Amino acid sequence: MMELVEVTKVYSRGHSSVQALRGVSLCIDGGEFVSIMGPSGSGKSTLMHLLGALDTPTTGQALFQGRDLHRMSDRERSLLRRTRIGFVFQFFNLLATLKAVENVALPLLLGGESAGKARQRSLAALERVGLSHRADHFPDEMSGGEMQRVAVARALVTEPAAVICDEPTGNLDSATSKEILSLLRDLPEKGKRAVVMVTHDPTAAAFGDRLIHIRDGLIEKEEENGAPVIPVPPPSRLRVFPEA
Amino acid sequence: MFSLYQTLSLRYLRMHRARTVLVVLSIALGVATWVATDLLNQSLGRSIRRAATPLAGIADFFVTNNALGSVDVNLVGRLARVPGVQRVQPLVLEKVRVEQAGESKPGAERAKSVSAMLIGVGLSQGTLSENGLINDLKARGIDVDEKDLRNYGLSLEANKLLPVMLQLPPPVLVGEKMDQDLVQGREKLLIHVGSKTHMLRRVGQVRAKGTSSSLGGYVLFMDDQSAAHLLGQPGRVSRLDITLNPEADKEQVTQALRTELGNEADLQSPQDNDRRLQDVLKGIEIGFKLCGAGALVVGMFLVYNALSVSVAERRYDIGIMRSVGATRHQVRFLFLGEAVLQGLMGTALGLPLGLALAHLSLGPIQEVLKGLFLPVTDKGQLDLNGMQALAAATAGIMTAVVAALVPASQAAAEEPADAVRRAPRVAGMFAWLIQLAGSVVLACVGIALVAHKATMRATPGQLFLGSLDADEVTFLGLACLLLGCLLATPFLAACLTRCLQPLMRWLLPIEGRLAMDNLVRSPGRTGLVIGALAAGVALMVQTAGIIRSNEDAFLGWIDNTVQADLYLTSGGPISTGGEVTRMDETIVKELLAPLPEGGQLLPQGTQLVANCYRYVDWKGATGGTKIFLVVVDALEHYRANHSRLPNEESLDLYRRLAEEPGTAVISENFSVLHNVQVGDTITLKGEKDLSYRVIGTLLDYSWNRGTVIVDRTQNVQALQAQMIDSFDVYLPPGSNAPQVRDQLQKSALGARFSLFAMTKGEVRHHVLELMHKLYGLAYTQEVLVGIVAVLGVVMALLISVLGRRRELGLLRAVGGTQWQLVHSVLAEAMLIGLVGTILGILLGTPLEWYAVRVVLFDEAGFLFPVKFPWLAVLSISLLAIGAATLAGLGPAIQAMRLRIADAIAYE
């Protein structure tokens, strides 16, 4: 479903440049729950942005359902995110002025769906995360766990093919984290939806089917159910950046 | 401290280049408006003074008789004998028409003549030596070579010695410009005075410069007696200029001069003259000054806004600075220093911009004044002196500093621990309360000043704080009230946006709804910008309302009272002061005479009503001013209009004017302004004091200081009313007025006198055009205020995009397209425009009412019905909302370019 082929990402800041990814190849299938771990500055957020079509690689290919993100227009990528990808962020990223149900309905309303229908679908999504009773509350009236559930409901409301989670439990206590992780664990459906979770919490990462370790812009190793399976060789693309 | 500025302030300003540029531009526009209005006021004042008293020179007093139009030249000898008087210079000034080169035959078909100023000075009085005369003329702006002056003197003497039959045409010195344009080397030239044509002989040249540039370069220069003779008024001159001995006691000489003059003429100092002119033009001057100050105030609010946001943004930095030992003073001075720097940059840009703005506006403004008041024909000078530049620079920098005081204090008050750990700010309520209290205080002061003005009106001459008169107090009061309302706009805007929110949530798509929510959330950021926009809209609505109310009243007046089919003048339309020349009353015979080729210029049965107009000095209840005197053929007017306006009651007053000697009719505004009632007696200075019993009042909008109408037949001698300014032409039924007009203008007579005829419809159009030109000036200034406000909108939206960065990033993350982001920012801009417009209309409507019912009534005595300018308000609303929306385009593009990953990145 999602594939990165020899992907590099360079951020230019004036005269200097920072190489966030140095040639990463990765394939995630539908129905998989993949955890990505790594220390700060390892490139995991960049990896997540590429997987989620929030950004495009400097070199290499990022494919979503076989389509090259680099060849897509900004509008096409927006539509892709709106309909095929859901996001869950560490700090929930809910709009303070919208009620829970309106926050969930945001992608639908952006897609031009009628307010009534959007509300109906959003309520269903909230029901799925067990929060329909808080539908008409504003974010500042909710706990952290509730807000993250709303974020999960928003990620699910369009029935996306993939859900990308960036440190979804980073701002929650351990009990609430467990609840959210259980919720996320149930999201992949065999052969259908993929879930990618970026985290640096080993407990959270253990919820995944597959665990990818990333360091200095490279995939260090991959584990499946705790056992290392693939030692990853250094990428040939490194030659493109001799200064690195 | 400088290195601190360099490290923190300059870098911050560089990093936020767009915002810095907007702040600098706001101040620059404010300073530019200030400078431009100051320069225009100064230049126009100078031009008008020159136009009102041409060739003023260095005289200490002028002796005039405005009602009569001339004074007896024998006064020269009498006044020269008054102890302390150094010299008395007689002057003749009158517009004449000069035929153009190549078509010198009088009355030739299609011959054209142009207007020129005939200047006569006392060459033959023997009061000046030739050199003395040259210097005296130089002081008046007339530059003449000694050789030319001697030539002139010799020609004059030769003519005196020769018998009449052998005499050559009278000599004349011709203005340089006119010499090049018209005379083109001819020795003889023809001039028309009234219905008479005279031939003159060119013997040399003069150059009209400096103070006499108001005459426009088309001048004919002669001795006073020859000029008076040409004008058909031998022994009379337009003015006497008196110069005193430097050591003379001015008070004493003044008294002696007044005694000597008695009732024959007025003695005026240049200062008296200025005061009277200022009284007429004060409204425009104050309007200019207020607009300049208004632009600076609006700019100040925007600087305040930008700096407040800057403080909020840099709170964390402030915390770190304080943690590492910065004192509160250092923090405060850091922000004040930034403001001073931006003020300096704004001023540096504003000074040349203001000069350019003044240069661009001078021409159109002079055109308006020329059409409405006086023949302002000089090009005007715009000199920015050191004091003015210093005042503007101080105003620009002080604006920035005053605007920075509160944000800088807020920054200094930050507790380092709170700022570093980003604890929410609990303050704000106090600042809001201060702002609210300030707005209430200002509004109360404004109302109190406006109320105080009413008591000042009752006591003429009373000054407020020792220097402000009633009008200035009114404008100061209104300015305070407007400023108070401006300060209150964040609250009003917050209330209005909350009221509009449910409707907008229902009406707008999600992008618009988010924009509305954002607007409700941030009254501090957008409130002042909305206020600035509202101020601009309010001023425009007020002006549009005044125009609409004036327009309706003026048109009603014209439709009800102006009934002639044609209005006939010589040289140009009646209100164009610089062009019109007077006609001899004998022209009537020529107009009605049969043509050699058969037929008549004017159809059989045409009635002509002659009018003479004078601006007369008047010492009314409110001090010295100039009133409008209309000397009309009252009985002819009555007869001509009787069949056309059988039910018009005021018409009967004209019959009574003709039938009851020594009577006058006054305009309603004259009655109000000068507290003169029916039955009272008013006195004008003619050959002697002329007393008139007021027999009635009528509606007349001719002049903002009041109009007096008297019968010409009875006063033709007493007021020297043989020369006619205009004729009302009443054609017999069935006549085609435009056809008669064309025939008249194309005729030989029409060409000779440059006859200018306007139909009733054209008069109507002309009046409207002048009115729109006058108020167009007000619009121009208000548009400048509007531009500053729109810059504020750009700034508020740039700040909004920064503030909404994460929200906008999130929208993109969950599938919002770039265009949806653009829509959201533009929607916010549009909503700012909408709320500002609504508040502006709410504020502008009472302002219009006050301006029309109170200010105009106090100023001019005109009581117009208040009309709401629906169409104009619709246009202004569309313009304001459109401009605000367009202002959002830049920030919208910036939002569009946001990198999603950056926007949603965590701290």
Image (cartoon, rainbow, N blue to C red):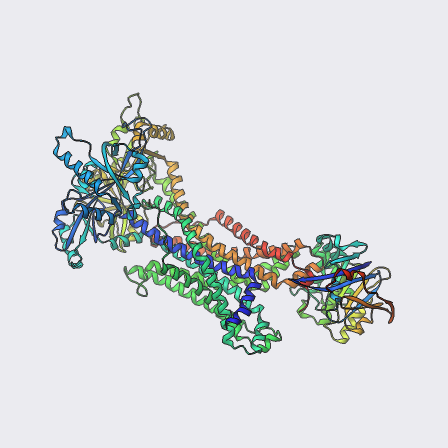
The reply to whether residue B725 is in sight is yes
Outermost residue, front side: A242
Quadrant of residue B827 within the rendered picture: bottom right
The reply to whether residue B699 is in sight is no
Q: In this view of the protein, which residue sits in the foreground, B678 or B617? A: B617
Q: In this view of the protein, which residue sits in the foreground, A7 or B777? A: A7
Q: Is residue B773 left or right of residue B211?
A: right
Q: In this view of the protein, which residue sits in the foreground, B488 or B328? A: B328
Q: Please determine whether, in this image, residue B827 is positioned above or below residue B239.
A: below
Q: Please determine whether, in this image, residue A223 is positioned above or below residue B171.
A: below
- Quadrant that contains the N terminus of chain A: bottom right
- Quadrant that contains the C terminus of chain A: bottom right
Image location of residue B624, percent across then percent down: 26, 54
- Count of numbered tags: 0
Image location of residue B701, percent across then percent down: 34, 46
Image location of residue B832, percent across then percent down: 55, 57
Quadrant of residue B659 within the rendered picture: top left
Q: In this view of the protein, which residue sits in the foreground, B355 or B276? A: B355
Image location of residue B699, percent across then percent down: 33, 45
Q: Please determine whether, in this image, residue B669 is positioned above or below residue A205.
A: above
Q: In this view, does B154 lie to the left or right of B621?
A: left
